[in-house]
Amino acid sequence: MAITTLPVSMTFSLSTGETVRLDQACLRLPTVELIETAIMAGEGLLVDSGALAVQTGKRTGRSPKDRFIVREPQSESQIDWGRFNQPCPPERFDRILTKVLGHFQQRRVFVTDGYACADPAHRLNVRVCTTFAWQALFARNLFLRPEPAELASFAPDWHILAAPGVLADPASDGTNSEAFIGISFSRRLVLIAGTEYAGEIKKSVFSILNYLLPKRNVFPMHCSANIGQAGDTALFFGLSGTGKTTLSADPFRRLIGDDEHGWSDHGIFNIEGGCYAKTIRLSAQGEPQIWNAIRFGTVLENVVFDPRTRAPNYADASRTENTRAAYPVDFIPNCDLSGQGGHPQNTVFLTCDAFGVLPPLSKLTHEQAMYHFLAGYTAKVAGTEAGVTEPEATFSSCFGAPFLPLHPTRYAEMLKQKLETHRCPVWLVNTGWTGGGYGVGKRMDLGQTRALLIAALSGILGDAEFDVDPMFGTLVPRACPGVPAKVLKPRQSWADPAAYDAQARKLAHLFRDNFSRFEDRASPAVRQAGPKV
């Protein structure tokens, strides 16, 4: 029996020593009632598959310039302050908190209680409070769902208060815009104001765990994971758009999770209970598992659909390239319901190289793995912004720099220790362009990428012959079943080899320039593992 109302009493401390409270009868609704409530409130509509389609206003992605961590004595010496971890004075956090609680008192508040971390030894109880029914459904889909008996005694470790209708005032609140995402480790509280984009809810919990888990010798990872028929676990690291969700949703392997995991002394575990898949240019043929997961109970964000037939047009990027589907992981038919797996037997780094330089697959030494992990490379394609005529390199440390409260080298050292302890091979897979850069070449064939992964994960490439890439020093297989030989060597796929050489040198210099910020903290072996310019 679902609990429809929940008396919520929350007390939070202010930096002055005073406290503020919220005592309110909140709504804790099952999925079907959340959907009905969202539709009646005008928050969204059902599309032809039964999914709930919503729009997130002018913010269709995360707002990293509006994300702050409260400067507090318990944590400030550990935080890697800078571009992604902007300090917030406690009194500023107080002002936003007071605004949010006042806003809640005037509106319906929906509560979602869920777990983060499938391993009970590291479980975090999270309570999400929001004024939007669809955001409550999003949280229900993305976090691990307690059983009814567990809900009766649920005690939150952390609160997330999401109030899109509260607009910060840069002049009086000291914010950068009307949006504010603030994390207080001492109060165990997240405030999200001025943005409807639900990804902020999900990523705030990941940021929290990137601070907490290393203290327990657990490596937090921005990666997807699955298990093969032989029980072998594989990890897939990558930034948005590199194929992390697509390639881990493999009909021949059981999905553990599509985005966030921890690696403990006992194996890996999913941090979440759902998937947050990009849907731009989604097709039933290319990604059947994701396509079939978009049904009743799924939330579609910013997807354009026909107003009469309600048929989504996944090719339409007029609102944003960052269209999304949020659904429980068990909407993927061959998911692993335990959310856990053994120590990985293969690790894959995914990159979408729009320069067309990197091989579709290469093998890395552990030193090269640390180098590429700290680099976290992918590329934006030309044409996404006015005046952009060439691919733009993007480097995001550990494939998730915006979510790392600690210095990136802390996570890289954890990766190295795990890889060496468990003798785990690392593969670099380019899902970007071949035969030339964006505008000249073509996107890697998804079928060929899958063939390369099958060969790597199954051990077929274990006895293969490799050549050393002259620029990047990685090992490139000479042959792979189902993949033309010239595709394996990107220089051979270009019509003009000299043009390839120039582009490769350009990308290598970008790598070296980016890595200069780690020169003083990386070992000589890791520094030498980069491209040879």
Image: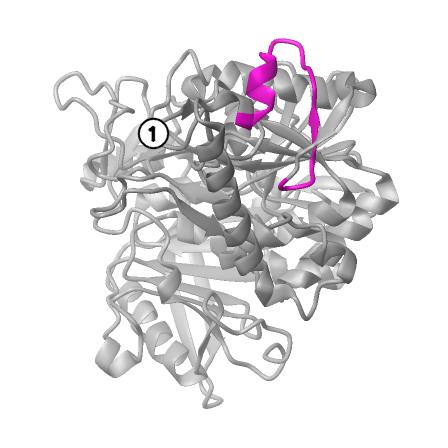
Quadrant of res 177: bottom left
Quadrant of res 364: top right
Q: Residue furthest left?
A: 308
Disc 1: which residue: 280
Q: Nearer the viewer, residue 81 or 387?
A: 387
Quadrant of res 125: bottom right
Q: In the rendered image of this protein, does residue 328 appear above or below residue 132?
A: above
Q: Nearer the viewer, residue 188 or 67?
A: 67
Q: Is residue 481 on the magenta stretch?
A: yes
Is residue 253 left or right of 307 when viewed as pictured? right
Residue 29: x and y, percent?
40, 41
Q: Residue at x 45, y 90 (%)?
A: 16
Q: Which residues are magenta?
A: 471-491
Q: Residue at x 72, y 44 (%)?
A: 119
Q: In the rendered image of this protein, does residue 85 appear above or below residue 474?
A: below
Mark 1: secondary structure: loop
Q: Nearer the viewer, residue 159 or 490?
A: 490
